[in-house]
Amino acid sequence: MARGASSHFSLKRAEYDRYYPTVLGVLQNSGFLVMDADRDENRAFLQGLPRSGAGPGVEIEIRRKPKGLDIHVLVVPHEDLPQDKGQFLMKRGVFGTLQSDPASQRTLEGILPALRRDGMERTVDPRFRRTPTNIPEWIFFNLKTGTVTWFLGTVIGLTGAAYLLFWAPEGPYRQNSPLMTGLLLVLAPWWSGIWGRSALRGLAAAFVTVSLPVTFYVVSALGWGFPGLTRPPGITLIQVLLASIQGPAGIAVPVILGILSGIVGAIAGVIGGRIFPLKARRSAESI
C-alpha cells in the first residue's frame, strides 16, 4: 500500500496550454527534476524526482475541462514511483488507499501555493463583463436582487385593481359580490406580492396595490372629491365598512383593506421567493 499525500483542486479560468509550462517551472524551482511526461490535447501527466536524490517525488495530472482545469497532485517517497517510461502511479488509482506520510505531506504543502496561485488564471477584460459596471443594474431587468420585478409587479397589480374599481365595463360579473371582492383583495395583491419574492416586499406591494385605488374610491364615495368614480353596484365589502365607520373616519377603510390584502401579499411573496430566490447584489469588482 502506497504512502504519501495528495491534493485535488480546480482552476476555473486557467488555460491548459499556459498552465503546463508553469507547472514545469514550479517543479524545477521546487528542487525536482522532471523525469517523465505524458501529454495530449486534453490531459497531461508529469513526474518529478528530487534533485538531491533523497526525499519524496511528485506526480501531477492536468486535465482540461469545459471551463478551466482539474489538477491532481500526488507526493510519495521517490522509490515508490514507477521507473518505466510512461508509467505513472496515479494511473493505478492509489488515492483511495494512500497512507499518510509526514515527509510527503510537508513537500505537498510546499508546492501547492505555487500551483494554485491566482495569477495563473486568465484575467477577464472588464469590458466583457456580463453587466457593464457603468450602467445601472435595473436596465438589465436584474432578477437577482428583485427590485425591478417587485416594482413592475406592484404597478401591474395596482393597475388591475384600479381597472376593476373604476374602468371595468358593465357585465354580469359586476353583480357578483364575492367575485369582485376576491379579485380585489386576493388576486390583485397575490399578483403584486408574488413578484416581491419575500414576505416583507410582498406585504408592501399588496398594501399599495389595494389601499391606493381604494383611497380614491372612498374619497369619491364620501363626496370629498373625484365624482363619478363610484359606480353602482359598488364593492359590497367597501360599502359595508363605510356604513360601519361613519363620517371622516371612513378614510380608514383603505388602510384596513390594505392590511388584509397585505397578509395575502406576504404569503404570495414567500412562495415567489421559493420559486425565484433572491440573491445578493453582485459587486462591481466581481466577474
Image (spheres, grey):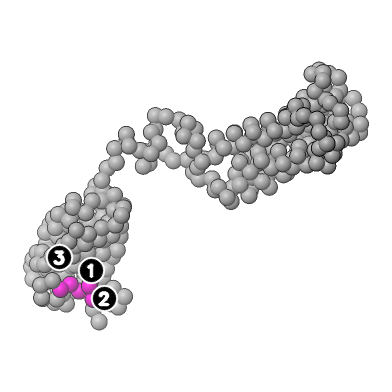
Reading the image, the residue beneath label 1 is 74
Q: Residue 6: tell me if it is visible.
A: yes
Above or below for 249 versus 67: above
Q: CA distance from mark 2 to mark 3?
A: 18 Å
Reading the image, the residue beneath label 2 is 94
Image quadrant containing the N terminus: bottom left
Residue sitting nearer the eye, 92 or 25 = 92
Q: Position of residue 197 (x, y in %)?
A: 60, 44
Q: Residue at x 72, y 41 (%)?
A: 187
Above or below for 137 versus 19: above
Magenta span: 87-93
Reading the image, the residue beneath label 3 is 38
- Is residue 244 on the magenta stretch? no
Residue sitting nearer the eye, 112 or 195 = 195
Q: Position of residue 231 (x, y in %)?
A: 84, 26
Q: Residue furthest bottom?
A: 1
